[in-house]
Amino acid sequence: MYDKTVRRRRAVLALLVVLSLILLTAYFGESSDGGLHSVQRGFLTVVSPIQEGANKALKPVRDLFGWFGDTLHAKSQLAEVRKQKDKLLKEVIAERADQHGYHELLALDHLDQLSLNNYRR
């Protein structure tokens, strides 16, 4: 019973794939005023108002999901910026400590030069 259902489903799938390939080949092979193009235009004439209505009705939902997506993206960007800020702050603190140490060394060197000059007199 199960095998029969599976085989039937596979056969229907294969038939639909073959039918799709045949229709696509025929559609692209015919001129723009052919029968399949006319069917497509008729179908679009019927479906396009439904599509426009659905787009208008679902726009708030799309906007809501977009807002959530943008918010999550902004939060991840904020976390990355904070990491960069912390890294740069550590670099600035290290640079200032190096400058402070350099100025202390200059002051000590100056004092050393003064004491050396006083010693020589």
Image: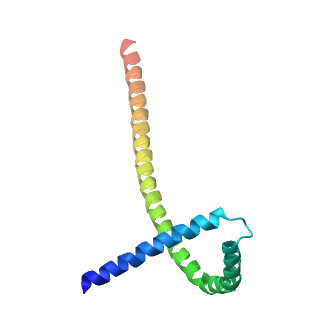
Residue at image x 57%, y 79%?
62
Q: Position of residue 93 (x, y in %)?
A: 42, 47
Q: Position of residue 13 (x, y in %)?
A: 41, 75
Residue at image x 50%, y 76%?
68
In the displayed structure, 51 sits above or below 101; it is below
Choose top left, top right, bottom left or bottom right for residue 25: bottom right
42 and 30: which is toward the camera: 30
Choose top left, top right, bottom left or bottom right for residue 110: top left
Asked whether, in this view, residue 57 is left or right of residue 19, the answer is right
In the displayed structure, 47 sits above or below 86; it is below
Residue at image x 46%, y 54%?
85
Position of the C terminus, as image quadrant, is top left
In the displayed structure, 28 sits above or below 14; it is above
Residue at image x 41%, y 78%?
12
Q: Residue furthest top?
A: 120
58 and 84: which is toward the camera: 58
In the displayed structure, 96 sits above or below 121; it is below
Choose top left, top right, bottom left or bottom right for residue 56: bottom right
113 and 98: which is toward the camera: 98
